Amino acid sequence: MPELTPSQTVGPYLALGLTWPDGHLVVPEDAPGAIVVHGVVTDGAGEPVPDAVVETWQADADGRFDHPEDPRGGSGFRGFGRCLTAPDGSWRVVSVKPGAIGDGQAPHIDVSVLARGLLDRVVTRIYFPDEQAANAADPLLATVPQERRSTLLAVPDGPGRFRFDIRLQGEGETVFLAV
Amino acid sequence: MTTSPPTHVRGYAPAPAGTHPNLDWPAYRSTELRAPKHRPILLPHRLTEVTGPLLTGPAGPADNDLTRQHAGEPQGQRIIVFGRVLDSDGRPVPDTLVEVWQANAAGRYAHQNDNWPAPLDPNFTGSGRVVTDSLGNYSFTTIKPGAYPWRNHHNAWRPAHIHFSLFGRAFTQRLVTQMYFPDDPLFPYDPIFNSVPDEAARKRMIATFDLDATKPEWALAYRFDIVLRGREQTPFEEPHA
Ligand SMILES: [Fe+3]
């Protein structure tokens, strides 16, 4: 059987290969129910990380994936967002709030972060602050130490806006997940 | 539409130890403030992880020929880079977007932050996209990138390489890697190449010269097969409401 190809860093010039004009638009800005999820990526010194890319993957508003492994069928929803960080470490994705899949998990977005200085991607999840009951029953959140759980919760930031900062290292380090 | 989600999903097998770099790798100095200090928490694979973006765009017609993106031909050795994208069960990964980026023949990137004294090439941008066919095959035409210096340590040079980004068919299969060329004298000195602990795994990042695929009086050819994660042998038992 073939053996896996190793991971390597995206390096400093990722913008050359990974820039898409509409990468951050999972849905158009003016789509009904559109939300903005945004934040900054910072390093262990609290400095912004200007050469990272944040990628998101999520269900549609009904909790479905447009993918053959979802037996309920797809809605044509792209589900994928990609935003390179700006010089101030900021990123921003326009999407819809994912619905509950119906398998006991709270609504969530899977996130990959790749950057210069990261030899492999790091993975985390965004949960929503207005889903307290669902979050309390979520099987993954239950395995995260209480004192670090808040790093997986987006922060309300105005109507239809959620803030999710990603701290790669140090104080308030984001919980990263082994997939 | 039906509304019941799958109650079981079959997850993806973990990578054998030594296949991927440890994030904390002091020889590559940029890891120092960026590698997380906490151990990652296990995310058992559920529907979100075994699905993923099935993107075939935004690859355009000229995107797989990096020598034809400008009015003139770029400087350097024209090469064909091709191969198959497979999973570790041996199955091809069809219809998946492959993104590549690289330096020009002189080792310089067409990027504002790369300003070491090597020439830019007005006929070379160094980025391309290609989608695998139904058997997982891909191919693109480019020029052989040069080695380039970086400031990681005294007299540090990266071996010539092409950056590759792949999605596969699931969130768990996402991979970004670098393809290297055979017999590069810089291998022993490169902390990024050597961040992969297992020597056999490291060698899987090196393309092989393929005379049969070479086009006479046109281009040399290198084969680079890429292997993404395959499935777990048994489905993950999902306790659900
Ligand atoms: Fe590079």
Image (cartoon, coloured by chain):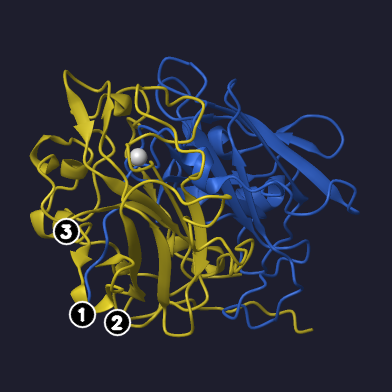
SS at badge 2: loop
* Amino acid at circle 1: Met
The residue identified by callout 3 is B201
Which quadrant: the N terminus of chain B? bottom right
The residue identified by callout 1 is A1
Q: CA distance from mark 2 to mark 1?
A: 6 Å
| Dot 1 beta carbon under 8 Å from ligand 1 | no
The residue identified by callout 2 is B90
Q: x%, y% of residue B62? A: 57, 63
Front residue of this view, candidates A29 and B209? B209
Q: x%, y% of residue B228? A: 35, 67
Q: Residue sitting at 47 percent across and 74 percent down? A: B132
* Amino acid at circle 2: Gly
Q: Which chain is blue?
A: A
Q: CA distance from mark 3 to mark 2?
A: 17 Å
Front residue of this view, candidates B154 and B67? B67
The reply to whether the C-beta atoms of the residues labelled 2 and 1 are less than 8 Å apart is yes
Chain B takes which shade in the image? Answer: yellow
Q: Residue sitting at 44 percent across and 59 percent down? A: B174
SS at badge 1: loop
Which quadrant: the C terminus of chain B? bottom right
Q: Give the chain of mark 3.
A: B
